[in-house]
Image (cartoon, grey):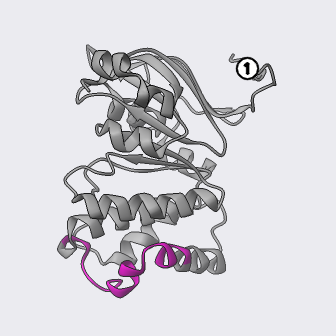
Amino acid sequence: MISHEPAAAPDGAPAATPLLAIRNLNAGYGAIQVLRDVSFDIIEGDIMAVVGANGAGKSTLFRTISGLLTPSSGEIWFGQTNIAGLGSAEIVSLGLSQAPEGRRVFSGMTVEENLRLGAFRRRDKTRASVSAGMEQVFGNFPRLRERRKQLAGTLSGGEQQMCAIGRALMANPRLLVIDELSLGLAPIIVEELLHTLEVIHESGCTVVLVEQDVSIALSFSDRAVVMQAGQVVMSGISSELLSNSEIMKTYLGG
C-alpha cells in the first residue's frame, strides 16, 4: 500500500498530501506494454501539465487513471481510495472527470443533452445542484448557452471542446483532466479556453492539462511531468522546465 506521508518540499516544509498519487503503474493493450512503472503526484489546488511527444503514453496514462483501461500492475490513489481497476463511472462519482482527446461529443444530441449526460454520476445529484451546475457551465462558456438546443455535431471545433469540458464539469469534479486541449484549434480559441480554465481552477478545481504543445502546457501550469516511451523522464516546476534548453531539446524536441 502506498504511504500517504507527505513528501518533503524543496524548502524543507512538508508538502501537501497528493490528491492523486500514482505508484509503479504499468498498462497497455494486450501484449503491448505502453506504461512502464509510472509514478508521480498531483497536489490538490495545482494546475498540472503532463507533456510529451505523440506516442509518449499520455493518453494511455489517463485512460488508465479514468478507468477506461485496466492496469496490469501498480496503484492509483485518489485521496484515500485506490482506484486502480475501478470502473469509469465509479471514478467519476469519486470526483475525477476527464474531457477526452478529440472532444468526442455526442454529435446527434443537443448541447444541453450532452451536458446533462455529464451529470449522470455527479457527486451531489439533486435537481437543484444539476441546474446550478448547468448555469455554472453556461457562465464559463456563454456560447454554449446560445447553442444549448443545437446538435453538438454541428458546433465548431472550439465549441465542441467547450461542450466536452462543460460535460466533464457537470460531474462536479475535484480533479479535471483535459486531454489535448489545443489539438486542431486556432490559437485565439486556445487562449480563450485557457482563460476559462484559469477561472475554473480559481473556483477550487484541480486541473491537469495533457498536451503535445509543450509551450502552451508549461506556460499555463504550475508543475509538470515529462513522458517519453511510456515513462516519466522528468518532473518539476513548469517555468524551470520551460527555461531549460537542454531539457526541451532532449525530451521535448524543442
Q: Is residue 159 left or right of residue 40?
A: left
> Where 25 falls versus 17 (above or below)?
above
Quadrant of image for the C terminus: top left
Foreground residue, 185 or 116? 185
Q: Residue at x 28, y 63 (%)?
A: 188
State whether residue 17 is above or below residue 108.
Answer: above
Provide the residue designation for mark 1: 7
Please name the amino acid that badge 1 sits on. Answer: Ala
Spot occupied by residue 203 in the image (x, y as percentages of width and height)? 64, 62
Quick check: is 162 in the magenta stretch?
Answer: no
- Count of labels shown? 1
Q: Which residues are magenta?
A: 136-153
Task: Locate residue 173 relative to residue 155 in the image: left or right.
Answer: right
Judge whether 38 appears above or below 43 on screen: above
Is residue 137 a member of the stretch shown in magenta? Answer: yes
Give x and y (percent) for residue 64: 42, 32
Is residue 70 among the parts visible in the rendering? Answer: no
193 vs 115, nearest the viewer? 193
**Residue 146, can we see it?**
yes
In this orientation, which residue lies closer to the viewer: 47 or 215? 215
Q: Position of residue 237 (x, y in %)?
A: 54, 29
Label 1 CA crowd tier, 10 Å (few <14, some 14–19, many 20+): some
Query: What is the chief secondary structure element of the magenta stretch?
Result: helix
Q: Is residue 99 left or right of residue 65?
A: left
Residue for point 35% across, 31% down: 58
State the image quarter where residue 16 is shown: top right
Q: Residue at x 80, y 25 (%)?
A: 14
Quick one: quadrant of the N terminus? Answer: top right
Q: Residue 189: image x %, image y %?
A: 29, 64
Q: Residue at x 42, y 57 (%)?
A: 194
